[in-house]
Image: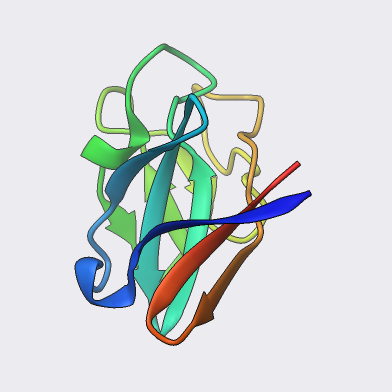
Amino acid sequence: MKELKVCDLSDLEEALPRRVEVEGEKVSMVLLNERVYALADTCSHEDVSLSEGEVDIEECALECWKHGSLFSLNTGEALSLPATKGVKTYEVSVIDNEVLLVIE
């Protein structure tokens, strides 16, 4: 495992997904309530970018813009249909304003 810098904390806006690419993996980064989350950026239901969706603050989830499936920011679990499979989540740490992603 290794930690890679993906952005600065100041690059992220509250509840606004941001897409980054790390070693060929597309990842959606979300800052919510002073915590940074990272999910695989591709919806498990259809090949669309989750970073283009909206954050559901009450559910702590990211919504797929195309069909409305919600994915938990904590676990990646699919919380609503039509998606039935979750997406990968990544461990994130913030050190001195740098957002680091753990890649296995």
Figure quadrant of residue 78:
top right
Residue at (31, 57) in percent of width and height: 55
> Who is closer to the viewer here, 48 or 67?
48
Colour pattern of the rendering = rainbow
Q: Is residue 102 visible?
A: yes
Q: What is the count of numbered marks?
A: 0
Residue at (27, 67) in percent of width and height: 15
Left or right side of 51 for 27: right
Q: Is residue 35 above or below residue 63?
A: below
Residue at (62, 45) in percent of width and height: 76
> Who is closer to the viewer here, 28 or 87?
28
Q: Residue 98's spot in the image, x, y percent?
A: 41, 74
Q: Is residue 57 above or below residue 63?
A: below
Q: Residue 43's spot in the image, x, y percent?
A: 46, 25
Figure quadrant of residue 67:
top left
Left or right side of 18 for 57: right
Left or right side of 51 for 37: right
Q: Is residue 29 above or below residue 49?
A: below
Residue at (44, 25) in percent of width and height: 42
Figure quadrant of residue 99:
bottom left
